[in-house]
Amino acid sequence: QVQLAESGGGLVQAGGTLRLSCAASGRTFSSAAMGWFRQAPGKEREIVAFISWSGQRTYYADSVKGRFTISRDNAKNTVFLQMNSLKPEDTAVYFCASRRRDSLSTITSGYDYWGQGTQVTVSS
């Protein structure tokens, strides 16, 4: 069992930065692949970024590539999402999720545990 709690969301102007954190509890965190997803009002939840348990493999959605960076600190059971050059279209609730299989998945059904989400609002 893994419990996840996101933090770091907020209101920021376009071009600004935010750093999201996802704190995990549970003995399986260090062996779990992690993903960040987001869901805007009226839209489906979509993958933003993925990181393997070792941190050696990452994936980014095209819409955030070059602006967002995913990382993890297994010693602190935490995964991060550094978001730079934010745009109004990045406005959404951001969720972290864990996946027992250490392979890339870009769909929500590929993840086993989810946090409650943190709101990110980017004003123009």
Image (cartoon, grey):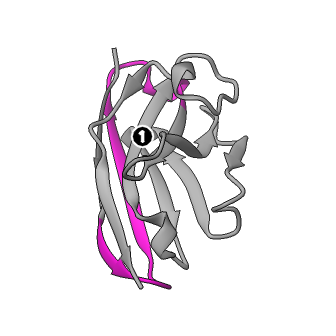
Disc 1 packing (10 Å; few <14; some 14–19; many ≥20): many
Question: From what the image shows, is residue 113 above or below residue 8?
Answer: above
Residue at 29% across / 52% down in the picture? 118
- The residue indicated by pointer 1 is 96
Secondary structure state at the residue bearing disc 1: strand
Per the rendered image, the range of residues in magenta is 10-33
Question: From what the image shows, is residue 66 above or below residue 44?
Answer: below
| Rendered location of residue 67, percent (x, y) | 62, 70
Specify the quadrant of the image occupied by residue 85.
Answer: bottom right
Quarter of the figure that contains the N terminus: top left
Question: From what the image shows, is residue 34 above or below residue 118?
Answer: above
Residue at 57% across / 53% down in the picture? 70
> Relative to residue 91, is residue 85 drawn left or right?
right
Residue at 63% across / 62% down in the picture? 64
Quarter of the figure that contains the C terminus: bottom left
Specify the quadrant of the image occupied by residue 75.
Answer: top left
